Structures are given as structure tokens and as C-alpha cells.
Amino acid sequence: GAVVSQHPSWVICKSGTSVKIECRSLDFQATTMFWYRQFPKQSLMLMATSNEGSKATYEQGVEKDKFLINHASLTLSTLTVTSAHPEDSSFYICSARGGLAGESTDTQYFGPGTRLTVL
Amino acid sequence: AQTVTQSQPEMSVQEAETVTLSCTYDTSESDYYLFWYKQPPSRQMILVIRQEAYKQQNATENRFSVNFQKAAKSFSLKISDSQLGDAAMYFCAYRDYSGTYKYIFGTGTRLKVLA
């Protein structure tokens, strides 16, 4: 099936620094990618939707200046957490809408997630 | 606004037995998609099964099948011959047929499989 990768899988940073997380669709083109945040034992919370070549659409309550999203190509989207603080520590998951050739594009395929710890 | 409800925070099933996970949703749309995703301890979200609302036939994928009741807005997942590897969080998700392609997730059901 369609594969989505995320890098890094785990990152620890100091408070005040910025962290970039990459999301790639490996074997298909993804016109739309999504970024989620998941707290322990909770569901996924959608942060933003990004379309290739255009500005991301952020969900209500998500600070666009803090969580910068760039969708520069059909296979790559990045999430940059700027001036990270301990409360930004979480599990971040990306997904890509699409599929292999001939498959429906109605399904989201998820990356393995990135655990961010801010000290 | 659409909502998805999973009323069972946790379920247990004996290995080789059958278990059904519940999901209800609310929408005013007539065309939409429904999904079940599995999230094992690795936290990788894995698509289990998908259902298009316009299809009356229930989707099946090997040991996984759904009972889709459109009028009742119910979308339950049945796992047959449960295996230890089925232990995970299971999330039900809804998506409009058109528009933003966003998913609305339920709160999840943790499935334990007992040996």
C-alpha cells in the first residue's frame, strides 16, 4: 500500500529553539497533506491542512506563526515548531491524501509519527 | 457539524473469538466515507477498512468487516478470529464526500486480546 514517512521519529530540543519535521509520500503524489497532534491516550487532533503550492489552512486555535507548514512539492510537507516550549511536547503525525496509481484518493495514509520533547 | 462517537473506551476479547467495536456518527450529508484505523503501540496509524456511504454492501477485509447502518448512522467493526496482533487502539473516522477531505475522528477504543 501507499507509504508515508516522517523524519525524525524522535527529537529532543531545548526551549526556545525551532524544530522541523518532514513528511514524505514515498510512492505516490499527495496533493493534500494533514498534520495532527496526539496527546497520550487521546485521539488525533487536526492542526492544519496543506495543499501543494498554497498556504496551509489551520484549525481554530492553532497558532499559524508557531506551527509553520510548508508543502513545497507533491511528496513533501514540513512542519516547523518555532520557539518550542515544553507545552509543545507531543506526538505529531502527518498524513497524505492519495494512493497508488489506479487507487482511490479518498483515503489518508499516515506517517509513523514524530515524538517531540522540549526541555 | 459532523461528530463521531465511540462509546466503548476499552474492550477485551479472547484470542480466536469475535469482537465488535461500535461507532456512531452524525451528519446531514448523504454522501460520505467512513473508515476504521488501527493504532498499535508503535503508534503507526493503519487503515483497516473503508466504506462509501452510497454503497449498501458492507465492506470486508479478511477477518475485518463492518456493519454499516446508514439510517441509524452506525458503523461498527467486527473482528473475527481475534489475534494477539489485533491489540491496539481503534479509531473510527468520517469524511465528507467532497470539500476539504478532512477526517473527523472518534475518541478511540482500546482493544485488548487475551491469550
Image (cartoon, coloured by chain):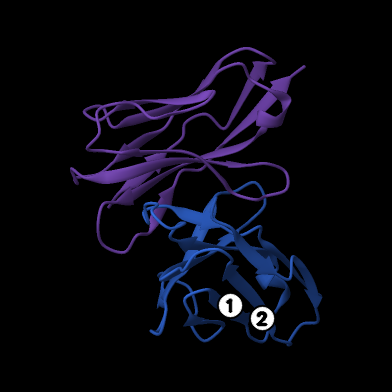
Q: Which mark is residue A55?
A: none
Q: Chain of mark 2?
A: A
State the residue at coordinates (67%, 86%). Answer: A83
Say above or below: B101 vs A79: above
Residue at 70%, 78% (x, y): give it: A85
Q: Are marks 1 and 2 in contact (CB under 8 Å)?
A: yes
- Which x, y percent locates residue A34? 48, 66
Residue A20, label in figure: 2
The 10 Å Cα crowd at callout 1, few under 14, some 14 to 19, many 20 or more, is: many
Query: Could you tell me which chain the residue with mark 1 belongs to?
Result: A
Q: Position of residue A21 (x, y in %)?
A: 65, 75
Whole-percent x, y for residue A84 in the image: 69, 81
Which of the 4 image quarters holds residue A36?
Answer: bottom right
Give the left or right position of residue A5, taking residue A47 as reference.
Answer: right
Q: Helix or strand or loop: what does disc 1 sit on?
A: strand
Chain B colour is purple
* Residue at which label 1 appears: A79
Going from N to C along the chain, the mark reached first, 1 or 2, is 2
Q: Colour of chain A?
A: blue
